Image (spheres, grey):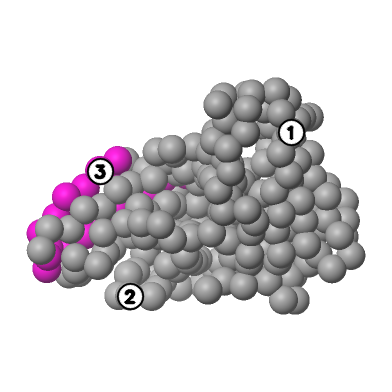
């Protein structure tokens, strides 16, 4: 069965620190990969996505992610976090061509201290 | 704003009751999917609707059912509510030809 694993459940950083959140998936075929963010009290918001092409993708708010096919990974990075980045981050995989079906990881809570 | 609207935003039901949640998809989106997000967990796929028919289902029992209407709006119905059904229910819409899914703000269901 397809699954997504996020290694860090709770991350605490100071402002200006660098961020890397790990994400691994299990699926042997073609996948579309996503990172979503959920700010407190708000809806899930798309940060970035990978469908094909350049494995390094850039998203909104200075976030980027790198798809490494050999490692089944899609880690999220940001060089310098801000207090406003405090939120829940979800990695998700869309596999098998079913547009609406995403498999989500369990999420990582990021807390940025001012 | 994603253009996906859900109602109601919060509701409380008693175990054994039935509930209907509603969703209006983003303009131009003909595919609607529903997710359940329990506290502290990632969203779990319930099912998807395309052209008014169920088109893919996750690991949820038959008491979870849905409808899609000609205007692409959708309903999620849950019968015989159980305490574990307490969660945030998310609706998402997408184009059948596209691969990006946009989420609504969700409906918080509490079963007591």
Q: Any mark on residue B18, and which?
A: 1
How far apart are the alpha carbons under marks 3 and 2?
A: 20 Å
For the residues carrying marks 3 and 1, which lies nearer the camera in this image?
1
User: At which x and y percent is residue A18?
Assistant: 16, 63
Q: Quarter-wise, where is residue A20 in the image? A: bottom left
Residue B98 in view in this figure? no
CA neighbours of label 3 inside 10 A, class few (<14), some (14 to 19), many (20+)? few
User: At which x and y percent is residue B27?
Assistant: 72, 76
Count of numbered circles in the view:
3
User: At which x and y percent is residue A110?
Assistant: 26, 52
How far apart are the alpha carbons under marks 3 and 1?
A: 35 Å
Q: Which residue is mark 2?
A: A61
Give the magenta part as a residue range.
A8-29
Q: Is B111 or A66 nearer to us in this picture?
A: B111
Q: Residue at x 30, y 40 (%)?
A: A9
Left/right of residue A112 with respect to residue A23 in the rendered view:
left
Q: Which residue is mark 3?
A: A10
Left/right of residue A35 with respect to residue A63 in the rendered view:
right
Q: Relative to A34, does residue A104 appear above or below in the rendering? A: above
How far apart are the alpha carbons under marks 1 and 2?
A: 41 Å
- Label 2 marks which chain's residue? A
Q: Residue at x 67, y 41 (%)?
A: B46
């Amino acid at each position: 069965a397809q699954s997504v694993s996020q290694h860090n459940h709770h991350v605490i950083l100071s402002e200006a620190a660098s961020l890397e959140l790990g994400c691994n998936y299990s699926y042997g075929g073609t996948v579309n990969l996503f990172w979503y963010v959920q700010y407190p009290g708000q809806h899930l918001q798309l940060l970035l996505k990978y469908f094909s092409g350049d494995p390094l993708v850039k998203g909104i708010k200075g976030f980027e992610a790198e798809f490494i096919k050999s490692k089944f990974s899609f880690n999220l990075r940001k060089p310098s976090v801000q207090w406003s980045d405090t939120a829940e981050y979800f990695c998700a995989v869309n596999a098998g061509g079913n547009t609406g079906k995403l498999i989500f990881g369990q999420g990582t809570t990021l807390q940025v201290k001012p | 704003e994603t253009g996906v609207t859900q109602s109601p935003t919060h509701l409380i039901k008693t175990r054994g009751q039935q509930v209907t949640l509603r969703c209006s998809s983003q303009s131009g989106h003909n595919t609607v999917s529903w997710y359940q997000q329990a506290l502290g967990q990632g969203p779990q796929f319930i099912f998807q609707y395309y052209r008014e028919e169920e088109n893919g289902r996750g690991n949820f029992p038959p008491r979870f059912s849905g409808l899609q209407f000609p205007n692409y709006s959708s309903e999620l119905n849950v019968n015989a509510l159980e305490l574990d059904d307490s969660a945030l229910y998310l609706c998402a819409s997408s184009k059948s030809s596209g691969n990006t899914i946009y989420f609504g703000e969700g409906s918080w269901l509490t079963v007591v």
